[in-house]
Image: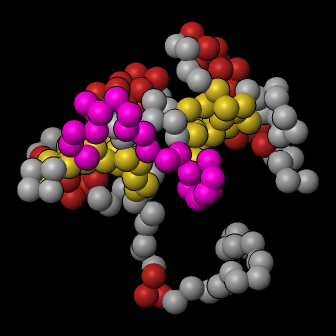
Amino acid sequence: MNFNTELQTGVCENPDASSKGFVLNHSMLRVKDPAVALDFYSRIMGMRLLRKLDFPEMKFSLYFLAVAESASRAPQDTGERTAWTFSQAGILELTHNWGTETDAEFKYHDGNAQPQGFGHICFSVPDLDAAIQWFDNNQVVYVKRPEQGKMKDVAFIKDPDGYWIEIVEPGRLKQLGH
Protein backbone atom coordinates (compact mmCIF):
# COMPACT_ATOMS: atom_id res chain seq x y z
CA MET A 1 0.00 0.00 0.00
CA ASN A 2 1.35 3.45 -0.93
CA PHE A 3 1.62 6.28 1.57
CA ASN A 4 -1.12 8.89 1.20
CA THR A 5 -1.00 11.27 4.19
CA GLU A 6 -0.56 11.40 7.94
CA LEU A 7 -3.92 11.93 9.56
CA GLN A 8 -4.29 14.85 11.94
CA THR A 9 -7.22 17.08 12.80
CA GLY A 10 -7.97 19.21 9.77
CA VAL A 11 -6.25 16.97 7.20
CA CYS A 12 -8.41 16.01 4.23
CA GLU A 13 -7.54 12.36 3.53
CA ASN A 14 -8.95 12.36 0.00
CA PRO A 15 -8.66 15.77 -1.68
CA ASP A 16 -11.10 16.56 -4.46
CA ALA A 17 -9.92 15.56 -7.93
CA SER A 18 -10.13 19.26 -8.89
CA SER A 19 -6.82 19.82 -7.07
CA LYS A 20 -4.98 16.97 -8.85
CA GLY A 21 -1.81 18.27 -10.49
CA PHE A 22 -1.46 21.33 -8.23
CA VAL A 23 2.25 21.96 -7.54
CA LEU A 24 3.82 24.23 -4.94
CA ASN A 25 5.83 26.19 -7.51
CA HIS A 26 7.74 28.84 -5.57
CA SER A 27 8.21 30.77 -2.38
CA MET A 28 9.08 34.46 -2.53
CA LEU A 29 11.52 36.47 -0.45
CA ARG A 30 11.91 40.23 -0.80
CA VAL A 31 15.56 41.28 -1.08
CA LYS A 32 17.20 44.64 -0.51
CA ASP A 33 20.01 44.28 -3.05
CA PRO A 34 19.61 41.68 -5.81
CA ALA A 35 23.35 41.53 -6.58
CA VAL A 36 24.12 40.57 -2.97
CA ALA A 37 21.24 38.09 -2.73
CA LEU A 38 22.01 36.52 -6.13
CA ASP A 39 25.67 36.10 -5.16
CA PHE A 40 24.65 34.30 -1.96
CA TYR A 41 22.06 32.01 -3.52
CA SER A 42 24.17 31.17 -6.59
CA ARG A 43 27.67 31.03 -5.11
CA ILE A 44 26.99 29.79 -1.57
CA MET A 45 23.80 27.77 -2.08
CA GLY A 46 24.57 26.57 -5.63
CA MET A 47 21.33 27.76 -7.22
CA ARG A 48 20.99 28.85 -10.84
CA LEU A 49 19.05 31.86 -12.09
CA LEU A 50 16.29 30.60 -14.39
CA ARG A 51 14.64 33.88 -15.28
CA LYS A 52 14.61 37.58 -14.43
CA LEU A 53 11.42 39.51 -15.06
CA ASP A 54 11.33 43.32 -14.84
CA PHE A 55 8.21 45.37 -14.21
CA PRO A 56 9.30 49.01 -14.80
CA GLU A 57 5.81 50.44 -14.41
CA MET A 58 5.67 49.01 -10.87
CA LYS A 59 9.41 49.40 -10.17
CA PHE A 60 10.29 45.85 -9.21
CA SER A 61 12.10 42.81 -10.57
CA LEU A 62 11.63 39.09 -9.98
CA TYR A 63 14.46 36.55 -9.99
CA PHE A 64 13.54 32.86 -10.18
CA LEU A 65 16.18 30.42 -8.97
CA ALA A 66 16.40 26.63 -8.86
CA VAL A 67 18.91 24.06 -7.71
CA ALA A 68 21.47 23.34 -10.44
CA GLU A 69 20.11 19.88 -11.29
CA SER A 70 16.65 21.31 -12.03
CA ALA A 71 18.02 24.31 -13.90
CA SER A 72 20.00 22.08 -16.27
CA ARG A 73 16.68 20.85 -17.72
CA ALA A 74 15.34 24.35 -18.47
CA PRO A 75 14.66 25.24 -22.13
CA GLN A 76 16.92 27.78 -23.87
CA ASP A 77 14.04 29.78 -25.41
CA THR A 78 13.08 32.53 -22.93
CA GLY A 79 9.32 32.14 -23.42
CA GLU A 80 9.50 28.36 -23.05
CA ARG A 81 11.82 28.77 -20.06
CA THR A 82 9.37 31.19 -18.41
CA ALA A 83 6.50 28.71 -18.82
CA TRP A 84 8.75 25.84 -17.67
CA THR A 85 9.82 27.85 -14.59
CA PHE A 86 6.20 28.28 -13.53
CA SER A 87 5.58 24.53 -13.86
CA GLN A 88 8.36 23.42 -11.52
CA ALA A 89 8.37 22.57 -7.82
CA GLY A 90 10.73 24.14 -5.32
CA ILE A 91 11.62 27.41 -7.05
CA LEU A 92 12.85 30.40 -5.04
CA GLU A 93 11.62 33.81 -6.16
CA LEU A 94 13.60 36.84 -5.04
CA THR A 95 11.67 40.09 -5.39
CA HIS A 96 13.54 43.38 -5.57
CA ASN A 97 11.64 46.62 -5.11
CA TRP A 98 13.79 49.16 -6.93
CA GLY A 99 15.65 51.67 -4.79
CA THR A 100 15.95 49.62 -1.60
CA GLU A 101 19.59 48.81 -2.39
CA THR A 102 20.58 52.47 -2.02
CA ASP A 103 18.79 53.04 1.31
CA ALA A 104 21.30 52.30 4.09
CA GLU A 105 18.52 52.08 6.70
CA PHE A 106 16.26 49.76 4.72
CA LYS A 107 15.67 46.25 6.11
CA TYR A 108 13.02 43.59 5.59
CA HIS A 109 11.35 41.81 8.51
CA ASP A 110 12.66 38.23 8.62
CA GLY A 111 9.50 36.84 10.20
CA ASN A 112 11.31 35.51 13.27
CA ALA A 113 11.38 38.75 15.29
CA GLN A 114 8.14 39.96 16.85
CA PRO A 115 5.54 39.85 15.51
CA GLN A 116 6.47 36.40 14.27
CA GLY A 117 5.14 35.13 10.98
CA PHE A 118 7.19 33.62 8.18
CA GLY A 119 9.91 31.39 9.64
CA HIS A 120 12.42 29.98 7.17
CA ILE A 121 13.16 28.11 3.98
CA CYS A 122 15.07 24.81 4.02
CA PHE A 123 17.81 23.23 1.94
CA SER A 124 18.68 19.57 2.25
CA VAL A 125 22.32 18.75 1.68
CA PRO A 126 24.07 15.44 0.96
CA ASP A 127 26.66 15.94 3.74
CA LEU A 128 25.89 18.26 6.64
CA ASP A 129 29.47 18.33 7.92
CA ALA A 130 30.82 19.34 4.49
CA ALA A 131 28.09 22.00 4.16
CA ILE A 132 28.97 23.45 7.57
CA GLN A 133 32.65 23.58 6.55
CA TRP A 134 31.63 25.36 3.31
CA PHE A 135 29.52 27.89 5.24
CA ASP A 136 32.35 28.44 7.74
CA ASN A 137 34.85 28.98 4.90
CA ASN A 138 32.50 31.63 3.46
CA GLN A 139 31.74 33.39 6.77
CA VAL A 140 28.03 32.59 6.59
CA VAL A 141 26.12 33.83 9.64
CA TYR A 142 24.54 31.15 11.82
CA VAL A 143 21.36 31.29 13.84
CA LYS A 144 22.12 27.78 15.14
CA ARG A 145 24.92 25.33 14.44
CA PRO A 146 24.07 21.58 14.22
CA GLU A 147 25.62 20.77 17.60
CA GLN A 148 23.73 23.55 19.41
CA GLY A 149 20.36 23.40 21.10
CA LYS A 150 18.04 20.44 21.64
CA MET A 151 17.56 19.66 17.96
CA LYS A 152 20.91 18.21 16.86
CA ASP A 153 21.96 17.69 13.22
CA VAL A 154 19.97 20.73 12.08
CA ALA A 155 21.58 24.08 11.31
CA PHE A 156 20.07 27.48 10.64
CA ILE A 157 22.00 30.10 8.67
CA LYS A 158 21.04 33.60 7.54
CA ASP A 159 20.99 34.95 4.00
CA PRO A 160 22.15 38.55 3.35
CA ASP A 161 18.67 39.92 4.13
CA GLY A 162 18.51 38.06 7.44
CA TYR A 163 16.10 35.34 6.34
CA TRP A 164 16.67 32.03 8.09
CA ILE A 165 17.63 28.96 6.08
CA GLU A 166 17.38 25.54 7.69
CA ILE A 167 20.10 23.11 6.59
CA VAL A 168 19.47 19.37 6.95
CA GLU A 169 20.99 16.09 5.84
CA PRO A 170 17.90 13.89 5.29
CA GLY A 171 19.53 10.65 6.46
CA ARG A 172 20.26 12.15 9.87
CA LEU A 173 16.62 13.00 10.53
CA LYS A 174 15.06 9.53 10.76
CA GLN A 175 14.46 9.88 14.52
CA LEU A 176 13.30 13.51 14.37
CA GLY A 177 10.10 14.01 16.35
CA HIS A 178 10.25 10.65 18.17
In what quadrant of the picture does the C terminus appear?
bottom right
| Left or right, residue 73 beside residue 175 | left
> Residue placed farthest to the right in the image?
178
Q: Is residue 47 visible?
A: no
In what quadrant of the picture does the N terminus appear?
bottom right
> What's the residue at 67%, 32% (across, down)?
143
Which image quadrant is residue 150 in?
top right
x then y, percent, for residue 177: 85, 53
Question: Compared with residue 18, is residue 100 higher up or lower down, i.e. above or below?
Answer: above
Question: Compared with residue 6, is residue 153 higher up or lower down, i.e. above or below?
Answer: above
- Specify whether residue 124 is painted magenta: no
Residue 100 or residue 22, whichever sits in front: 100
Question: Compared with residue 169, is residue 131 higher up or lower down, i.e. above or below?
Answer: above
> What's the residue at 51%, 36% (across, down)?
162
Q: Is residue 110 visible?
A: yes
> What's the residue at 65%, 85% (across, down)?
12
Residue 115 or residue 78, whichever sits in front: 115
Residues drawn in magenta = 97-119
Residue 156 or residue 162, whichever sits in front: 162
Q: Main secondary structure of the magenta part?
A: loop
